[in-house]
Image: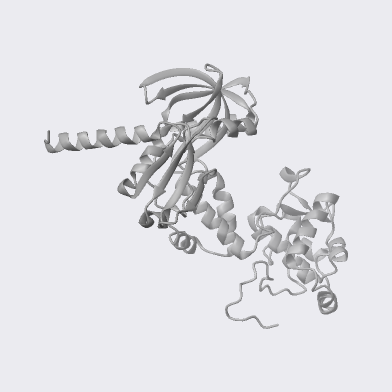
Amino acid sequence: MPRSANSERPLFGPRNLRVTPDSSLSELGFAQHGLVNHATSPENVRESPELSPSADTFCDAQSVSDRSHRKMTKTARVYKIEMLIRNRGHISFQALLDELEVSPATLKRDLDYLKDQLGAPIEYDRFLNGYRFGEEYRGQKHELPGLWFSERELYSLLMAHQLLSELDSEGVISRHLQPLLDRIHQMLGTSDTEAKALLKRVKIIGSAKRPVSSQFFELIGEALLKRRRLHMRYLTRGRGEVSERDVSPQRLVHYRNTWYVDAWCHTREKLLRFALDAIEHAETLDTRAKDVSLKQVEAEMDGGYGIYAGAKPSWVTLAFSPQAAQWVSREEWHPDQRGKWLDDGRFQLEVPYTDPNELAMDILRHADQVSITADSGAIKETVRKRTQQAWELHCAGKGVK
């Protein structure tokens, strides 16, 4: 059926390969990347009746078998080839033909696609007269990257990589994901130039980034996954104090362009949140980390406003002017917030908090467009003090008494 001009390009469609009865695996691209050993030279391939079918075989099989198996997509076929090799250890060309019931030409194209496009470590063994995984992959499950993704999904992965790279200024995560990124470009058939041009179409504007040493980021990430304790030297900026302590990392947190680690502090015997950029030194210990349930971590660390942790929050009620309400009504200040429209066009927002400092800064962003109508904690007094301090600092700079 003809495809419309604006229809989506099939990601796994057959390649335009010209196959003849004398086509060797090398000529079909099977020898690329060292995936075919010396036994698959042109002369050896032609000696094998399984690998060099006659012209009649090509014509008859292709006309009958391809018509009867249009129901099995290319994606399904390459998945089945990979599964058959993995389950049996090795399998002959003829056995693959019997299982898939396709023509030799189609099977050769599928094998070519598996190796050259998906990077499957398949090689032909002359003595076994069949295909198998390379030695380093035998006995392991080899996944076919990108096999279950549509073209749109692959483009979405590219965009996700671009977003992640903005969070990863030191390239700690990105360099480990680069092989996946390369494979996605290969699957899409885009060149390096096209890929860079595409990614330039997505821009993430950050603010006040605090870079984290890649050494500490990877060390903490590894300790988190392997459940090991850390010994670290940490600067508490609010007090200007440097302390040494052992911690058991529980999770990594990214908030407002800054990385944190929630960890059990063995010095203070409680969960604390540490900014990664305030770590002056860290090393992994052989001692197993203390396990704290994620439910407990969330209960103790996520109840407050912003980055401030706490299990018993206070609540504040804010009323935003009709002008500010156009934006605030669409924002999430806290997962547990409660909001509603008032009869006079203002928007009322109720927000929990444990420490008033960060919430006070967000309230002050709206200045004369917000009022505090109810407060069970110290937020009103904190806002008043910060406003007074700002005015005094402004007057001092202007020489006003």
Residue 144 lies in what quarter of the image? bottom right
x and y percentages locating residue 204 in the rendered image: 42, 53
**Position above or below: 335 against 378:** below
x and y percentages locating residue 4 in the rendered image: 62, 81
x and y percentages locating residue 304 in the rendered image: 50, 35
x and y percentages locating residue 200 in the rendered image: 43, 60
**Position above or below: 356 against 198:** above
Residue at image x 79%, y 59%? 81
Residue that protrudes farthest toward the bottom in the picture: 2
Q: Is residue 191 left or right of residue 98?
A: left
**Position above or below: 365 against 67:** above
Q: Coloring scheme of the render?
A: one colour
Residue that protrudes farthest toward the front in the picture: 343
Residue 72 lies in what quarter of the image? bottom right
Q: Is residue 200 left or right of residue 7?
A: left
Quarter of the image where the C terminus is located:
top left
Residue 74 lies in what quarter of the image? bottom right
Q: Is residue 97 left or right of residue 214?
A: right
Residue at image x 39%, y 52%? 205
Residue at image x 56%, y 61%? 155
The total number of labels drawn is 0
Is residue 48 at all visible to an observer of this figure?
Answer: yes
Quarter of the image where the N terminus is located:
bottom right
Task: Decide which of 312, 171 is in the foreground and name it.
Answer: 312
Residue at image x 46%, y 32%? 276
Is residue 185 at all visible to an observer of this figure?
Answer: no
